[in-house]
Amino acid sequence: MAILLKRKWITKEKIMTEKKYETEHLTISWKPEICQHAGKCVHGAPEVFEVGRRPWIMPENGSENLIKSVIDQCPSGALSYVEKGE
Ligand code: SF4
């Protein structure tokens, strides 16, 4: 599958950027190249996901259950999480 990135088509295999954020029980990943900027995250948990803030994801500002439920709604798959110990 190819995606359009800055007017260039690239394959998912070539995606290089993946940022990780840790909580006690979760490793959260964000892949900016495939984010569709649909806003599900910033509307679902604005205290955790805030565009323009650095870092823009602050998982310590929300519960892990809230973060998981918001990430589950990410339409692009840019956000994902892994439960530690799995
Ligand atoms: S919900 Fe997913 S696709 Fe939408 S802005 Fe957040 S990370 Fe990007």
Image: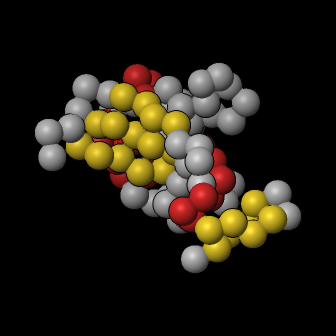
* 57 relative position to 65: left or right: right
- Asked whether the viewer can see residue 39, the reply is no
Q: Locate residue 14, reporting x and y percent.
A: 60, 58
Name above or below for residue 49 compared with residue 1: above
Residue under the point 29% across and 36% down: 26
User: x, y (%) of residue 55?
Assistant: 60, 24
Q: Residue at x 65, y 53 (%)?
A: 33
Q: Can residue 9 be seen in this view?
A: yes
**Residue that lies at the very extreme toward the left in this rendered image:** 85
Q: Which of 21 and 15 is in front in this view?
A: 15
Left or right of residue 19, residue 9 in this image = right
Number of numbered discs on residues:
0
Residues 55 and 69: in front is 55
The image's colouring method is secondary structure
Horizontal side of 15 relative to 9 (left or right) equals: left
Residue at the location (48% across, 50% down)?
Answer: 79
Determine the image quadrant of residue 76: bottom right
Quadrant in the picture for the N terminus: bottom right
Seen as rendered, the residue at the extreme front is 14
> Residue 28: which quarter of the image?
top left
In the displayed structure, would residue 15 be above or below residue 59? Answer: below
Question: Is 25 positioned to the left or the right of 51 in the image?
Answer: left
Image location of residue 66, percent across then percent down: 36, 42
Q: Position of residue 38 (x, y in %)?
A: 65, 59
Farthest-out residue, right: 7
